[in-house]
Amino acid sequence: VNSRHCQFALNDINCAMTSRNIVTVATCTLNQWALDFDGNRDRILGPACWMWDYLRRSGASGFFLPLSGGADSTSTATIVHSMCILVYKAAKKDPNSLVAKDCRRICGEKGQWVPHSSQDMANKIFHTSFMGTDYSSTETRDRAQKVADQIGAYHQHVTIDGIVKAILAMFFMVTTLKPRFLSQGGTRSEDLALQNIQARIRMVVAYLFAQLLPWVRNRSGFLLVLGSANVDEGLRGYMTKYDCSSADLNPIGAISKGDLKLMLKWAAIEYNSPVLEEVANVNPTTEFVPIVGNERTAHTQSDEEDMGMPMSLITCTQDHEEHEVVEHEGAKEFNSPVLEE
């Protein structure tokens, strides 16, 4: 964690770091966390400190996050929630501290103002949006709303169907062809193209809102766009280029899906937020294809089915701590509890 100028040296962590080609820890004093490592906690608090340090240096007035109601975007939102809690507590403890002054500047407040809660701060700097289509389920939309409400984010529901239809109409004018999903008799190429256009439109909309939402709220500045692509998707290649994974910051880019779910379950208890436990137990889905049947409550598309392998298998291939390397007849074999099941 690079928390320069001791922004979070609040009896928790005080790290001074220097770097040339390789980051070298010059001094590191751990007080409260001394040798008391908790992976789930540290995956939240470490990025939270880094994101605050980045935000206060960037000149931005907050963050924007496309919030789908799934584990990935909810994990990113939870890290921001943790950041707001840390800043709120520090500012409340000492309204004259550098943390409090930065908080006032970013929130657009003056005098000795400090947020009266982490939700109060989040509502000023954290903006989220559920970008739905005709294929989105009410289940994910409602979860996204509950997550945003719990954090205190400025949340909006945006429907992007009109943009999708406009682009497909332009394509028809040029080619006189209409692509179809696999379930509608189309080819694999047509199906992927129809899914990817939805994903890429969300990136464009995200940056539009990031630039203009401060103006909408009579504030100055701009918002940093947050991404939510986990490391498993990068290893497998299960992602769309230039979709919502393309962002200014991606705090979960080195964390596996399995670890994110464990992190959410820890945060559900730590922050008394049952919706995080609910999100952690949901099967991941992109919701880019038509729902099978008439029921719109839950979606029938599955990320693991689309990838052709479970997330746990991807995780075990890159988590060497969970593997035992065994020499067998001149060859190396990886024995994993997941692989053996």
Image (cartoon, helix red, strand yellow):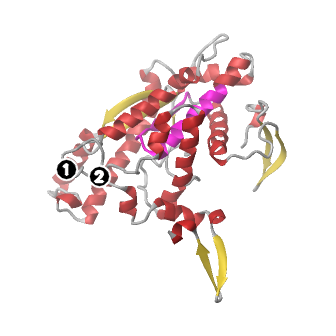
For label 2, the SS is loop
Q: Position of residue 237 (x, y in %)?
A: 46, 62
Instruction: Look at 17% across and 62% down and name the residue there.
Output: 185
For label 1, the SS is loop
Q: Does residue 323 sit above or below 241 in this rendering?
A: below
Mark 2 belongs to which amino acid?
Thr
Q: Nearer the viewer, residue 243 or 135?
A: 135
Q: Nearer the viewer, residue 333 or 188?
A: 333
Task: Give how far apart the Cα atoms at labels 2 and 1 are.
Answer: 9 Å
* Neighbourhood count class around disc 2 (C-alpha, 10 Å): few under 14, some 14–19, many 20 upward: some
Label disc, if present, on residue 293 of the rendered structure: 1
- In magenta, the rendered stretch is 61-87
Location of the N terminus by quadrant is top right
For label 2, the residue is 300
Residue 249 seen by the camera:
no
- Is 205 a magenta residue? no
Mark 1 belongs to which amino acid?
Gly
Label disc, if present, on residue 58 of the rendered structure: none
Instruction: Look at 49% across and 38% down and name the residue there.
Output: 276
Q: Quadrant of residue 149?
A: top left
